[in-house]
Amino acid sequence: MGGVGRAAARVAGAGWLVALLLAAWEVYARIWPSVFFPPLSEVLGNFSRMWLSADASSLFTSDLLREQAGTSLGRFAMGWLLAVVVGVTLGMLLGRSPVASRMYNPTVRFFTAVPNTMLLPIAVQIFGITSRMNVFLIFLGTVWVIIINTADGVAGVDEMWLRSARSLRLSRWTLYRSVVIPAAMPRIMTGLRVSLGIGLILMIISELYATTVGLGFQIVVAEKSFLYVDMWSAFVLVGLIGIVLNSIFTLVERRVLRWQRRSSLSDL
Amino acid sequence: MDLVVDDISKTYGQGAAARVAVTSASLTVGAQQLVSIVGPSGCGKSTLLMIMAGLLKPSSGRVALGERRVDGPPVGLSVVFQDYSRSLFPWMTVRRNLTMAAAAYRLPKAELKNRVEQALTSVGLPASGDLYPWQMSGGMQQRVAIARALVVEPTVMLMDEPFAAVDAQTRADLEDLVLRVRDEYKVTIAFVTHDIDEAVYLADRVVVMAAGPGRILEEIAIDLPKPRDQVETKLDPNFAALRSEVFRLVMRPGTTQKIS
Amino acid sequence: MTRDGKLGGAMLALLGTASLLTAWQLIISFGLVPEASIPTPWSVAQALPALLTDRDFLNGALDTVTSWAVTVAIGSSAAVVIGLVTSSVPFLRRPTAVVVDTFRSVPATALIPIGVVFFGLGSQMKISIALYAIFWPILINTVYGVASTEPMRLDAARSMRWPWWRRQVFVILPSAIPSILTGIRIATGVSLIVIISTELLGARNGVGTVLVQYTQALRPDVVYAGVLLLGMAGALLFGLLVQGERRLVRWASVG
């Protein structure tokens, strides 16, 4: 068996259960037909009509896909990346300063506990129905969990490492770059992973609630127009985007945490 | 009942990656004997013990307890593992740990209760039943592990480097504890260790193993007087002689010369 | 911490919170944002008593909490059982991991319009969507927990001749409990987010439904007071969960 064959066998060995569940969708929808629940094949056919094109120059995507997904992902990227920068910075400050952490810990814990979709009416009130509203919500909903995990990670750096770093007379900057940040990295990545999931949830809900463009809007428009096959193909697109973003994150995480021996689910 | 190991081999992996852990090992542990199995790391002594316990399938050969072939953990055989902190159940109290050890034996309630209390008394922890293992010191935890093995009143007890993780004084106490419960419970014991003093001090017979591939090198009868005593026995010139003999076998298996 | 240290900590916490409240007030006083869209801290505080005696709000809160409790109860028991079973069948482990990785990446809120089509605007819709959202994190944590079972403990159980089911119940499940509780803690947050999302989008009852009504009635002070209450309730719930967790798995932190 060649390398390609072996890789294919590996994928089949790992992915058959997903395939089985998708097949169950198809079979169920064929046996008990319902306008609400079209068979997978029908959804996929519609998916390619809606979202794909024959044009290689645009990577086979349709204009609609680029416009809608581009808008959604643009909002997501702005809100989330802003949250990452602000969250990691504030988390570092709180993690290294006991006084600051005592002062602001209650606030951070409070905002982590607020079910952050609750902020949606507030965001709409402040920004109206604009993309700034979506960005603001995604930012405000994800920044706290990043702050908490960064602060915990930085505060939890092994005192022995700090001591040995000091005995090497490292400069403050080097100390941070080569000891504190790497040591806190696993926790920081945990925070980022959780925030990624929350960010996507908020991206969609904010578009379902009030917008005129975006992936969430596509789902809700199809629903309101009784175009259930369209609704499902928009949902599948959102799902695929979620899967791709999470996979990219997993790759980055593995690369960043290379040094850490870790049993991830995919090692099982 | 005798525990008979007959021509056991164990190979891990297959083909080019195959690694021989133990090859054609045979030994017999007679009823109420204490046999120490000693050897350098990687000689397969723990593998051999796990095969004797029925926890690991041999690649060839057979183990028998009395008349019956061992092909799974047999009735009346208990194991004391190397690392108490990883073999006791930390979510159960000491008493529950002991009670559950006999769960498969379907004993009457009163009888089970008696046995649990008796086992705790035998290991010197009569009042510790309500503690959790993690509230105890390492030595105490290993006593609990021994008590847990005793609850089923085993005919055979297998001990896998049980005292590797405790300090020297505690270790001496625990060694004497093993000798005491051996007499009290009339139990046959196979005791794996890498400590030569310990092997000689405890045993009626020492089985020396060598590495690469793991195999039995030699069996040495230990005819030191009983009861053993941490000071008296170790002052005995015979002890010194046996000790050096085992030492030579373990450390320089190629150049062995019998001294006696 | 000493008594003095605790007092000092409380003082600092008060100081920090006060500084943020002042900043909030200043932003409005200097007209950085219009007061129509952000109420002052004081007016929010004034809205609290009204909200706490508002029957609609209290009924909505009760409905939200009930949906949440039902979701977490059903979701965790299903996910734990399925996690234990798939973990004990070697050829299911990797495929399950792939299924979990796939489905948990789908943002649950995208299911809300679909849920509305299927179940209408009642509790059934809320609970079904929230179940989807929490099932995967609990399942993944169960599988992690099972995988972290100490092999020597399993050997010990086997040497005591425990049958399969007894090893599952008395060794593997307890070993997985700390990880399962982490999963349930995550699920608590996620299910509240999803349930309130469904309420914002038109579910018939719930705290989100009531606050949307206040938004439409242009009462931002009440909406902010509601968020404040929910945040405090959430923080309280979270604290209780952590406490309970610590008590339940005292052994895990030590051994």
Image: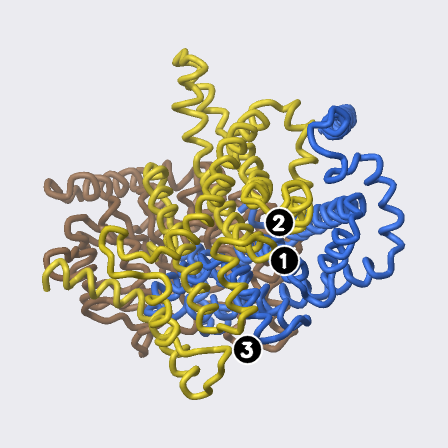
Q: Are marks 3 and 2 on the same chain?
A: no
What residue is rendered at 67% in x and 68% in y? Answer: C70
| Proximity of marks 3 and 1: CB atoms separated by less than 8 Å | no
At label 3, which amino acid type do we have? Answer: Arg
* Residues packed near mark 3 inside 10 Å, few (<14), some (14 to 19) or many (20 plus): few
**Which SS class for mark 3?**
loop
Disc sitting over residue C197 in the figure: 1
SS state under label 1: helix
- Give the amino acid at mark 2: Arg
- Marks 2/1 same chain: yes
Tell me the quarter of the picture where residue C57 sits. bottom right
Q: Residues within 10 Å of mark 2 (few under 14, many from 20)?
A: some
Identify which residue, C182 or A111, lies in the foreground: A111
Q: From where the camera sits, is residue C211 visible?
A: yes
The residue at which mark 2 appears reads as: C250
Give above or below for A170 relative to B227: above
Which residue is painted at 69% across and 41% down in the image?
A110
- Amino acid type, callout 1: Ser
The picture places residue C200, in percent across and down from the top left corner, at 67, 58
The residue at the point 61 percent across, 58 percent down is C194
> How far is the residue under mark 3 from the one under mark 1?
54 Å
Chain appearing in brown on the rendered image: B
Check the residue under mark 3 and report the chain it is in. B
Tell me: residue B22, above or below residue A138: below
- Horizontal and vertical percent position of residue B242: 26, 43
Q: Quadrant of the N terminus of chain C?
A: top right
Q: Nearer the viewer, mark 2 or mark 1?
A: 1
To which residue does mark 3 refer? B106
* Alpha carbon distance from label 2 to label 1: 36 Å
